Amino acid sequence: MNVLLDHLAEFREGFIGTVLLTLASGLLAMVLGVIIAGFRVSPVPPLRMFGTAWVTLFRNTPLTLLFLIAWFVVPVIFVPGMSPWTKALLALSLYTSAFVCEAVRSGISTVPLGQAEAARSLGMTFSQTLRMIVLPQATRTVIAPLSSIFIALTKNSAIAGAFSVAELFGVQKLLSDQGFAITWIFLWVALGYLVITFSISGLFRLLERRLGVAR
Amino acid sequence: MTASVLYDAPGPKARVRNRLYTVLGSLALLALLGFVVYRLDVKGQLDPNVWNIFNNAGVRSNIRDGVLTTLKVFAVAGVLSLVLGLLLAVARLSEHRPVRWFATGFIELFRAVPLLITIYALWVLFLSYKNDLGVVGDNAAFWGLVIGLTIYNGSVQAEVFRAGINAVPRGQAEAAYALGLRKYQVMTTLLLPQAIRAMLPTMISQLVVTLKDTSLGYIITYTELLYATRTMANNIIVNGENPFTAVTIVAGVIYIAMCLALSSLATWIERRGRRTKTGLAVAAAVDPAEQPLVLEVAGGPVGPADDDKDRMGK
């Protein structure tokens, strides 16, 4: 119990670190994932191939390995001198983008083909069909899987703590190294994650209720 | 390409345009690939000496040992998580309120906590009670990793089992009770076999996640594939530097191969299951998804999961 009160500053810093890292990499993963999903459904074979390769690669690689690559390979081969935070952002958002891509792609494929055909037969242009018919429906189906992906991302950000980025796991490591009772630290850190993941699922449930339509 | 909701079948103009995009896209991808190879070459990573290390018998046996320890952790944790998942699923469907509450709380807690934190906490716990528990050396890390993976994946598997049990048409259990079968008989002879058969692809997909997560052993310094290769690279010096890049690429390829093999097993079972007609649909093989998604896919089409209470009898 006292662990929390005596080290409130560390816990707060870790909590904020987790939230920031999750938000930033979630945003970047969204952008990347939507672009790659665009590649995967495009009529251009090389782009489709690239998208497939991207997803296969990042979905089947352990996140720890991606962190290692971001820490020890990327700085040597490509960009030297990145901060640990940027490296964590890179690893997390590349990994998550593959899952976002698949969610978006399956969202698009749940829109019945007839809808687009009807839109075209009404004389809508490609961008009108996309903007008014396909995307609004696809967005709604994607909300539920996206919320799971962001919850997983929050939990995955713990690995960044092991690579010495300030976040909640880092707090646990720090304090347990100082010899505090691991059970209590565990429970407090777990509570921190619960707060974040429940906020995410609550937010997305709200979105779902706002946007949801009977199909 | 197949019919898409996004594009019409291309006409002559669109075909020309697509061909142009194909050429441009190929060029862009080749340029990207070329850039990567160029950078690797500039940094001396393509030097034959760097890749020659994999001809060394010691390096090879190191990688082999890493793969074996990874597979060992995966096998033990995989089996234990399936057993725990089964127990938790049955407990969650129990008629006794405390049992149900305990199982629900357990599942919810450990699914919400990052696996790494569970593993780390267990590891520290085992290390600090080393003498009482009789763990020595690597054992603390091994059991921390295995039990952490078991608790987390067991919680996820429990929900998969539960979705499968809930998917069995209610009339079957009612008929069995009417025939005078006991509760455990209904569970073991009727519900579980069907649930497992229906959920096998999803369960195997979750095992892929378990396999990937064994790499968290790196962080608690357990000598699985990642840690083994990394420490090995630390001890080798080629052309004045450690061959981290080469070793990481090899480890990555091994992981991807293992995961893809397991996923294709799931897909194969799914396809086989679809061929046989037994009434209860076989769930889709979910690609190595993030865990909560697995539940929604599994729980979504097979019916509401909230009717646990009247599920188990009465």
Image (cartoon, coloured by chain):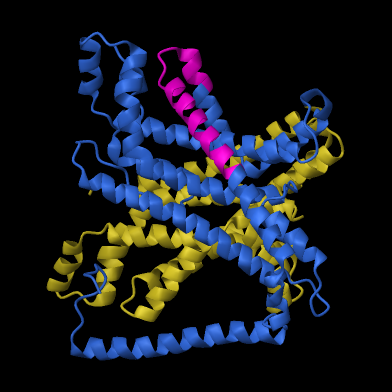
Which residue occupies the foreground of this view, A111 or B47?
B47
Q: Residue at x 27, y 57 (%)?
A: A110
Q: Position of residue B258 (x, y in %)?
A: 51, 56
Total numbered labels placed on residues in the image: 0
Q: Residue at x 68, y 72 (%)?
A: B55
Residue B204 included in the magenta stretch of the image: no
Q: Residue at x 27, y 44 (%)?
A: B273
Prevailing SS of the magenta stretch: helix
Q: Quadrant of residue A124?
A: bottom left
Q: Quadrant of residue A79?
A: bottom right
> Outermost residue, right direction?
A178
> Outermost residue, top direction?
B180
Which chain did the image draw in blue? B
Q: What span is colored magenta in the figure?
A: B73-102
- State the quadrant of the C terminus of chain B: top left
Task: Using the rendered image of the protein, determine whether residue A189 is visible from the camera's viewpoint.
Answer: no
Which residue occupies the foreground of this view, B112 or B50?
B50
Left or right of B288? Residue B136 is: right
Left or right of B62? Residue B35 is: left
Q: Position of residue B227 (x, y in %)?
A: 71, 55
Left or right of B148? Residue B190 is: left
Q: Residue at x 79, y 27 (%)?
A: B134
